[in-house]
Image (cartoon, rainbow, N blue to C red):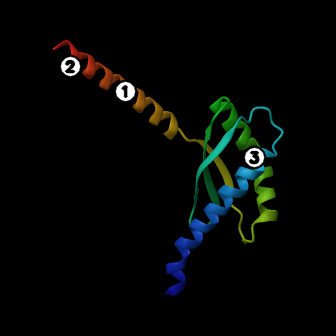
Amino acid sequence: MRHKKSTPNRSFRVADQIQRDVAELIRDLKDPRVGMVTINAVEVTPDYAHAKIFFSLLVGDAEETETALNEAAGFLRNSLFKRLQIHTVPTLHFVFDRTTERAADLNALINRANATRARDADEQ
């Protein structure tokens, strides 16, 4: 029974370690399509067979970078295998994370609404 309880913590630790290691390994990629990537989150399946890696970009094209990272996934997985002390190293799947993009859009909408409200208040 005790073993089952510690499994979720292990999953979080593995995801966290993958996040740190993949962030380091991406810096070593020579692919010009890979811009300034930030790894936002990693979700590992319960059987550790797959890891979905969410990333955002400071500079670069999202689709191009996603394609390049998924093409390099085998190389990155192989490099992870050498670093991680786990039996199964998951297959990596890179997904562009639009959260920061959406947050910026929402901020712009809120600022616009506040500016309109302030302008309307001044006119009254």
Judged left or right of residue 5, residue 26 is right
The correct choice, above or below, for 48 with respect to 115 in the image is below
Per the model, the C-alpha gap separating discs 1 and 3 is: 35 Å
Q: Which mark is residue 26?
A: 3
Q: Which mark is residue 3?
A: none
Outermost residue on the bottom side: it is: 1
On the image, which quarter does residue 111 sit in? top left
Q: Considering the numbered disc 2 on the image, is that residue within a helix, a strand or a loop?
A: helix
Residue under the image location 67 percent in, 59 percent down: 18
Residue under the image location 31 percent in, 24 percent down: 113
The correct choice, above or below, for 82 with respect to 66 in the image is below
Judged left or right of residue 122, residue 113 is right
Q: Which mark is residue 121?
A: 2
The residue wearing badge 1 is: 111
On the image, which quarter does residue 7 sit in? bottom right
Q: Alpha-carbon neighbours of circle 2 within 10 Å: few (<14), some, or many (≥20)?
A: few
List x then y, in percent, for residue 35. 71, 34
Outermost residue on the left side: it is: 124
